[in-house]
Amino acid sequence: MIWLALLAAVFWGTSPILEKRALGSVAPVAAVLLRSITVAGIAVIYLLWNHGSQTARQMGRWQDALLVMLAGLISAGVGQVLYFAALRGGKTSIVVPLAACYPLVTVLLSVFVLGERVRWWHMVGVLLILLGIVLISRHE
């Protein structure tokens, strides 16, 4: 599974370069729309091709489906528009690492919202993320 994560990192690392070039003429909201249509189309084709009539059952309980939809609104809707606006006006080498500090938010919310326990090495990681944010944003 490590190779899948590394491959995902390659794709995620490549996308901002393409997006930065496109955002010269494409508005951030339009970019989110184009990206969403593409991803939704691929997902629909995949689900229909591989699972056929099982697709509806794979959606889970309606409450959980709503949570996934809310997460999509927050991340793909609001977050992606803000990210594209920052990428359009800023340096890719600064915007992408700053936007990639979202694990810091996730760790904090997992403690306060989900009640998860954080080990000392998680806190070291959080401190390193904060240090990285300071170092990256300090030169801009």
Image: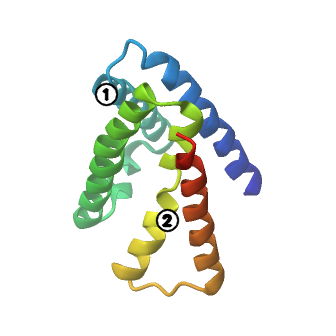
Residue 104, numbered circle: 2
Which residue lies at the image location 70% right of the left edge and 43% below the top edge? 7
Provide residue 47's location: percent of width, then percent of height: 44, 41
Q: Secondary structure at mark 1?
A: helix
Q: Secondary structure at mark 2?
A: helix
What residue type is disc 1 on? Leu
Mark 2 and mark 1 residues within 8 Å of each other at the beta carbon: no
Structural crowding at the residue carrying mark 2, measured as other residues with C-alpha within 10 Å and reported as few (<14), some (14–19) or many (≥20): some
Q: Which mark is residue 20?
A: none
Going by the picture, which residue comes out furthest to the front? 139
- Please indicate whether residue 63 sits to the left or right of residue 2 in the image: left
Which image quarter: residue 35? Answer: top left
Residue at numbered disc 1: 33
Q: Amino acid at mark 2?
A: Leu
Tell me how far mark 2 sits from mark 1, CA to CA: 27 Å
Residue occupying the point 40% across, 35% down = 86
Residue 40 seen anywhere in this rendered image of the structure? no
Residue 134 appears in the picture as rendered: yes
Query: Which one is nearer the viewer's eye here, 93 or 4?
Result: 93
